[in-house]
Amino acid sequence: MNTSTQASILLVEDMEEMRNIVQRLLNAMGFRSVTLARHGEEAWRLMQEKTFDLVLCDWNMPRMSGRELLERVRQDTRFATLPFIMLTGENTSAQVKSAIAGGVTGFIVKPFTMALLEQRIRACLAASSAPQSEARP
C-alpha cells in the first residue's frame, strides 16, 4: 500500500456538514479517492464492494456506531490490519480505552486541525505499508 495521496479512504460520518468539511480537507491534502458513508451499515456494505486503504470514522452514528463498525472490521480477517481512525466529539477515558481495546489505529477528538488530521492519516498509512517488524511500536 502506498502512503501517497493515491490512498483510497472511506469516510464514515452521519452529519452531512461534517462529512463535507472532512472531505474538503482530505481533497486539500491531495487525497482524491474518498468514498462517503452516512453510517456504519453503509460503510460495511461499501467495504464488501470496494478496497480501502484507510477508514476515517465518526463514533456516534445511527444504525451502526463507529465502535460497532470497528468491532465488525476487526473480526473480519480481510480487514484485520486496515488502518481505522476514529473521530469523536467526546474524549472520555472509557471511550478511548474502548476504541483501543477494539483495535483502533488512531483517535482524533473534534474539533481538530487539518494538520493533525493529515499527520494521523499519513502516519497510519505509513505504518500499514511498513513490514510487520517495523510497524510495531
Image (cartoon, helix red, strand yellow):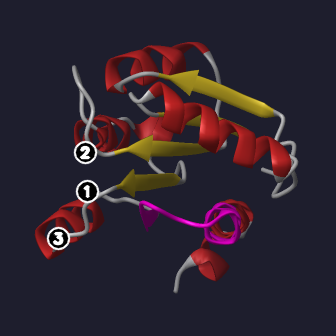
Residue designated by label 3: 92
Considering only order in the chain, which callout, 3 or 2, is on the residue closer to the N terminus? 2
- Does any portion of residue 3 appear in the rendered image? yes
Q: Magenta segment, which residues?
A: 106-121
Residue designated by label 2: 67
Q: Are marks 2 and 1 in contact (CB under 8 Å)?
A: yes
Considering only order in the chain, which callout, 1 or 3, is on the residue closer to the N terminus? 3
Across and down, in percent, residue 91 comes to 25, 68
Foreground pick, 75 / 4: 4
Nearer to us of marks 3 and 1 is 3
Tag on residue 102?
Answer: 1
Q: Amino acid at mark 1?
A: Gly
Nearer to us of marks 2 and 3 is 3
Residue drawn at x 61%, y 75% as measured from the top left: 135
- Above or below — where is 134 with respect to 66? below
- Does any portion of residue 7 appear in the rendered image? no
The answer to which image quadrant residue 100 occupies is: bottom left
- Above or below — where is 21 with respect to 36? below
Q: CA distance from mark 3 to mark 1?
A: 15 Å
- Above or below — where is 50 with respect to 105? above
Q: Secondary structure at mark 2?
A: helix
Instruction: In the displayed orientation, state which residue is furthest to the front.
Output: 17
Q: Amino acid at mark 2?
A: Arg
